[in-house]
Amino acid sequence: MTGAKNRQERRQPQRDDRLVKPRKAKSSIGRTEVQVDRDNILYASAFRRLAGVTQVASAGEGPLLHNRLTHCLKVAQIGKRMAERLLRSTSQAIIAGHGGLDPDVVEAAALAHDLGHPPFGHIGERVLDESVIEARVSDGFEGNAQTFRIVTKLAIYRPDTLGLNLTRATLNALLKYPWLRAEDGKKSKKYGAYRTEKRELAWARKLCKSADSRMCLEAALMEWADDVAYSVYDVEDFYRAGKIPLDRLVNSEAERKRFLDEVFAHWKSEGIEKDEDLHRKALNNLQSLLFRVFTESSG
């Protein structure tokens, strides 16, 4: 009975599992399996290419702006620190109930999370999706799904292995949208894998309950860190590129109203539902902060 139980435990999906088991045991240099993931992502050619992908303008054009590579480095730093803080402030029972938490997993997923995203953000993504659909490929194009394809199939790690052969935990943490593309609804717009990677998606999600379509805790932290990072430097980049007149927004209430009215009109035309009062308050808070910063720096 004990032997049968032990065999059953061995068959349970483990966080350190890899799709392809390495032929030879790695030399012991003190790294965990997830730290190996992190290092392989960092040295991948797909990661280096992110230096040429920007949100606001072409790389090398105009003022010095953030690119996807600097963005991923910042998301990794923020996400890892958030995970460490959560581990210190939350009981282990609660953490275990949510599938576990490893700051290194959050860091690795954050480094890889934008590998498949095209230049010019969601606009570039939408144009590519339309082009692929026109070519009669039903999955279209989605940056998160392309990231999953890169790490599982396209990136070069070893000549005898597809993709980076990441651990199950890191792959699961990459899945902000852990489902395939649906015919309609929200899941037709954002999805985490193409049908060509259906097997790899199912394999990664075995760490979660079968009926649970939510992202795991580590993916949630990675997404939160992503939001924090781009929300801060997008304002800086758009100001440097002359797209957001922060100087006028600080000093003119009429300018702030005109700016927000145009933003809300654009959102409505795109079918985007947002809380207008909340965003007006947020911009007023930003105006107060910027006014204080500008006053102190000029004083």
Image: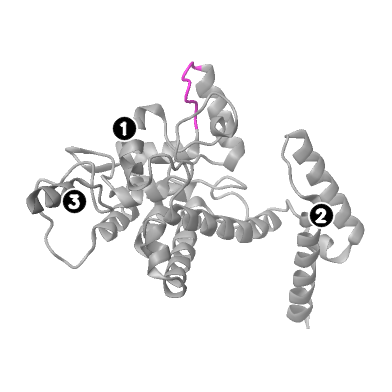
Query: Would you name the residue on which mark 1 appears?
Result: 199
Q: Nearer the viewer, mark 3 or mark 2?
A: 3
Relative horizontal placement of residue 256, taking residue 28 as reference (left or right): right
86 up-or-down from 135: above or below: below
Query: Would you name the residue on which mark 2 appears?
Result: 277
Query: Would you name the residue on which mark 3 appears?
Result: 9
Q: Give the residue at x 37% y 36%.
A: 149
Q: Position of residue 98 (x, y in %)?
A: 42, 57
Label 1: element kind: helix
Q: Nearer the viewer, mark 3 or mark 1?
A: 3
Magenta region's main secondary structure?
Answer: loop
292 up-or-down from 199: above or below: below
Q: Earlier in the sequence, mark 1 or mark 2?
A: 1
Q: Position of residue 85 (x, y in %)?
A: 46, 72
Q: Earlier in the sequence, mark 3 or mark 2?
A: 3
Q: Which residues are magenta?
A: 135-141
Label 2: element kind: helix
Relative horizontal placement of residue 123, taking residue 33 as reference (left or right): right
- Asked whether residue 98 is in view, the answer is yes
- Asked whether residue 120 is in view, the answer is no
Amino acid bearing label 3: Glu
Amino acid bearing label 1: Arg
Q: Position of residue 89 (x, y in %)?
A: 47, 74
Q: Earlier in the sequence, mark 3 or mark 1?
A: 3
Local packing at callout 3 (Cα closer than 10 Å; few below 14, some 14-19, many 20+) is few
User: What label sits on residue 128 in the rendered view?
Assistant: none
- Distance from label 3 to label 1 (Cα)? 22 Å
- Of 6 and 52, nearer the camera is 6
- Of 295 and 80, nearer the camera is 80
209 up-or-down from 222: above or below: above
- Distance from label 3 to label 2 (Cα)? 53 Å
Q: Give the residue at x 52% y 21%.
A: 133
